[in-house]
Amino acid sequence: MKIVLASRNKKKIEELRELLSELLSNVEVLSLDDVGIAGDIEEDGTTFEENALIKARVAAGSGYIGVADDSGLTVDALGGEPGVYSARYAAKCHFAGDHDDEGNNQCLLYNLRDVPDEERGGAYVCAVACVFPDGREFVVRGESRGTLLREYHGTGGFGYDPLFYFPQFGKTFAEVSAQEKHSVSHRGKAMRAFAKKMKEYL
């Protein structure tokens, strides 16, 4: 079974390949580049679910099963920000420099500078959408709650992982192994829900 993952993010593709290989047998994960889908996909949805579906529908245009995830960080004290803008949050802070992980993290730290420790709760959220060539589609969701720290801890992972403290581990997502992270992460939860749902459709 071939699945086209609507992404060009090498870290994300590798992470999803690892998760899927553990959950579904005989699955070959292809990227947009592998099937010749060029250009950027405009993610103009207002929710993670909407954006995941937009991307999965484009991937399904290849004739294979299209899968996409949209994920990000929602911070309670910031009214749910960065939310769907997690990957480009630095644009909200003129000083943050490049719109990369470092810029995004610096912007988040700045916006949380006056928020007391006990109010720095938030959640990583992941929505995974699946669209079949015949038009059938579904979306699942996973969440992991934690606390946003005031400084970086750890060098692993990506995104906001060095700031995302997970109480169950007593560490940030950047301080644990990939296997540990997968066991509790928003993406791990969403992919397990995806695999379960996928088996019902096949």
Image (cartoon, rainbow, N blue to C red):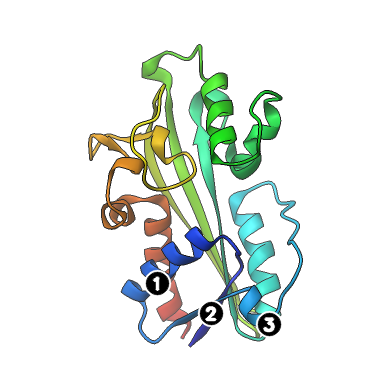
Occupied quadrant, residue 174: top left
Task: Say above or below: 86 vs 80.
Answer: below
Give, as a three-letter code, the residue at label 1: Leu
**Circles 2 and 1: CB atoms closer than 8 Å:** yes
Checking the image for residue 20, the label placed there is 1
What is the distance, in whole Å, between disc 2 and disc 3 at their CAs?
Answer: 10 Å
Choose the circle earlier in sequence order: 2 or 1. 2
Q: Give the percent coordinates (x, y) of residue 116.
A: 42, 13
Total labels: the figure holds: 3
Mark 3 residue element: loop
Sort mark 3 into few (<14), some (14-19) or many (20+) by Cα contacts within 10 Å. Answer: some
What is the distance, in whole Å, between disc 2 and disc 1 at their CAs?
Answer: 10 Å
- Please give left or right for residue 146 compared with residue 168 in the image: right
Residue located at (50% from left, 31% from top): 75
Give, as a three-letter code, the residue at label 3: Ser
Mark 2 residue element: strand
Q: Which residue is identified by label 3?
A: 62
Q: Which residue is identified by label 2?
A: 3
**Circles 1 and 3: CB atoms closer than 8 Å:** no
Task: Say above or below: 9 vs 202.
Answer: above
Depth check: give the residue in front, 181 or 74.
Answer: 181
Choose the circle earlier in sequence order: 2 or 3. 2
Mark 1 residue element: helix
Depth check: give the residue in front, 179 or 118.
Answer: 179
Residue 137 makes an appearance in the image: yes
Checking the image for residue 154, the label placed there is none
Depth check: give the residue in front, 140 or 100.
Answer: 100
Residue located at (45% from left, 76% from top): 198
Task: Say above or below: 43 vs 133.
Answer: above
Give, as a three-letter code, the residue at label 2: Ile
Q: Give the percent coordinates (x, y) of residue 60.
A: 65, 78
Residue located at (74% from left, 61% from top): 40
